[in-house]
Amino acid sequence: MRWNAGLFVVISVVAGFGSTAMSLVAGVWILDLTGSSSLAGLAGFCVFLPTLAGPWLGALVDRLPRRALLIGVDLVLAAVLLTLLAVRSREQAWLIYAVMLAYGISYVLLDAGESALLPAALPPTALGDVNGWRSSAQEGMKLIAPLTGAALYAWHGGPAVVLVSATAPILVAGLYTLVRLDRPAVTPARAKSRAAFGVLWRIRAVRVPVLVAGVTIAMSGFATAALFATVTHRLGLPAATIGVLSSAQGAGSIAGGLGVGRLLARFGPARVAAAGAAIYAGGSLVQNLGGWPVIVAGSVLIGLGLPWTLVAGLTAVQTYTPGELLGRVSATAGTAMFGPNALAVPLGAAAVHLGSRPPMFVASAVALAVAAYAYRRGGDPAQIALDRAGVGG
């Protein structure tokens, strides 16, 4: 177990470093080539867009050997990244968009494939711990990789970042070959027997944590514009100080990921998701009411709470989903957890015209309400036993 757990954490570090560095530099590169901030922002949209196709991409994961799929996707991604070495002028900027779209597709396939592979490589009792460690590793890379990517770009332009980022999936593909599988990773003959949406809706032990994660992450996106307004208008600080809040949130996420596994083992995914949503609500409320030091502390709380909801949702999917459907259910859950953010962000940007405080109050109230719902509906041991048998409601 320790061998596989260590491998998955290392995979998260290596993959997270390469993808985070490239995702940041893609926008900067487009901005330098075109001089347009709006065109630069579309790079991030290309990465996010394939998430909406999660249920269909996840079905592909269930039809193929999962380890082979992960290795193949990583090697193809490396090859696609290397095409960016041909970018020299504005006319070739479309290549960056194409590669970012490929990145987004690879994220969905790799996340679903790895989520489906984990139960074949680890005992059920270890899933929460390893998911938490992976979350901490990924958040740690969000603190390191952007600075490294920016430094590489300043030193030798986009090609330097491309070479480093293309190396990462090659290394990850090699690491996947070292994973020891104790159980079959896929049962193709049963892969078409049930729909992913049906699993998410029917099994309460899966439905509740995924719902909490989706709502809480959406509220975080809804409050983003209000946080900018709080910093720049209410406090009169430079917009660049948002970076301090991002670092504080990242620090909270690292800490939260390290301890969430024990909480999952003791209280179950629904209760941990509820706690994460409540902590997020408290952090958002603190940011809404306090001065600068208090806002930084609120960012730490938000960083602690959001990963709890996400790891709880992911662990619930891995624990309660039939093995032959793990790929499509994991991808569909990813769409359910991150898809609402696409609507929440622009709604929050519109709501900030009412002032910085109302959107943040709304975000806190909604997150607290969904936390209360999850606490009441998701923690009944008898119901969880029914869910394990596939007859829960």
Image (tube, rainbow, N blue to C red):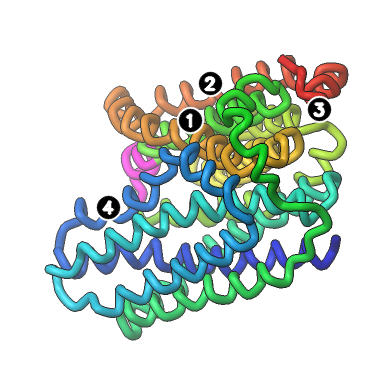
Nearer mark to the viewer, of 2 and 4: 4
- Residue, disc 1: 219
Q: Which residue is mark 2?
A: 366
**Tag 2's secondary structure?**
helix
Are the residues tagged 4 and 1 within 8 Å (C-beta)?
Answer: no
Question: Which of pointers 2 and 1 lies earlier in the amino acid sequence?
Answer: 1
Residue 308 visible at all: no
Q: Amino acid at mark 2?
A: Val
Q: Residue at x 76, y 45 (%)?
A: 260
Q: Is residue 125 left or right of residue 27?
A: right
Q: Is 273 contained in the magenta span?
A: no
Residue 41 marker = 4
Whole-Å distance between the Cαs marked 2 and 1? 7 Å
301 horizontally vs 259: left or right? left
Point 18% across, 69% down: residue: 92
Q: Quadrant of residue 309?
A: top right
Q: What amino acid is found at the position of numbered circle 1 in the picture?
A: Met
**Mark 2–mark 1 contact, CB under 8 Å?**
yes
Tell me where residue 91 sits by quadrant.
Answer: bottom left
